[in-house]
Amino acid sequence: MKKVSLVLMAFTLLVFWSCEKGIEQPTVFPKYFVWTGVKPKGKIRLFYDKKEITDQVEIDRVLNDTSKHFGESFKALNVYLTIPVPQIKDTVLTFTHPDTVRFRNSVYTSLLKDHMFTFTSGDRVLYNMSTGEIDPFSFQKHKPVQGPALPLITGYTHSAQLVHVAYGDYNSMELPVMGSVFKRFVKNSLGTSGYINSMRGVFNEFDEGYILKMQKGDTLLIQEYLYELKAK
């Protein structure tokens, strides 16, 4: 009888352990993420006159054209974006709570849905946007939350809360990064002509709808990446 009791006890413990093993353990915060790598998301893309140029020979020609430093600027930007600036041991992103994350010395609210995090900055960035200038967020898929118009006394015309996304969970994620170089030919009322140039590296994805918003003669080069992050 004693042997039967011991067998039953052992069986009960085994079943209990199996059930415990199947239970998903709650995530403990704070959660620290470190940089583990970077990989390109697709190929270099070239856009001109509201259409994408897929001819690799033409893409290479633009990249290697040194007359206006357009291709050189793009290459330099992409070298910068792929350099592992943070060491693996350094914390890149910290979830202090499930809905709060600290990233790039700023605090963001965080929303996780269908394996996609949406980070919205608590602070607003201030910037100028006058006639003829390039909207700094025009290429970005995830648009900022625009604030009210600013009075002239501030020295700025616009304010916005930045929005970033990441794909994954509280153990690992991929953070989209986009490098872009843009060129637009302009002519003012005095007859003077020239180019407006823009070079940016942002934590965002490309807005495919922007292609139809390009003006005649606009040139845009982009390369997207995914920064790989892992919880330590």
Image (spheres, grey):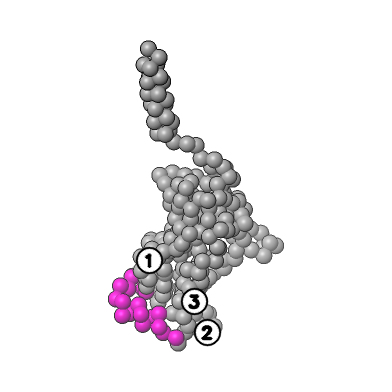
The image position of residue 36, as x and y in percent, is: 48, 59
Residue 47: x and y, percent?
A: 37, 72
Marks 1 and 2 sit apart, C-alpha to C-alpha, by 27 Å
Q: Residue at x 55, y 63 (%)?
A: 86
Element at label 1:
helix
- Identify the mark at residue 78; answer none if there is no mark: none
Q: CA distance from mark 3 to mark 1?
A: 24 Å
Query: Type of residue at label 3?
Result: Ala
In front of the other: label 3 or label 1? Answer: 3
Instruction: Report the magenta residues as a range.
Output: 48-66
Which residue is the site of mark 2?
A: 192
Q: The residue under label 1 is which amino acid type?
A: Ile
Q: Residue at x 42, y 25 (%)?
A: 13
User: Which of the two discs, 3 and 2, labels the residue nearer the N terminus?
Assistant: 3
Q: Which secondary structure, mark 3?
A: helix
Q: How many residues crowd around disc 1 within 10 Å: few (fewer than 14), some, or many (20 or more)?
A: some
Q: Which residue is mark 3?
A: 76
Disc 2 residue type (three-letter):
Thr
Residue 121 visible to the viewer: no
**Above or below 192: residue 129:** above
Between residues 196 and 177, which one lies in front from this camera angle? 177
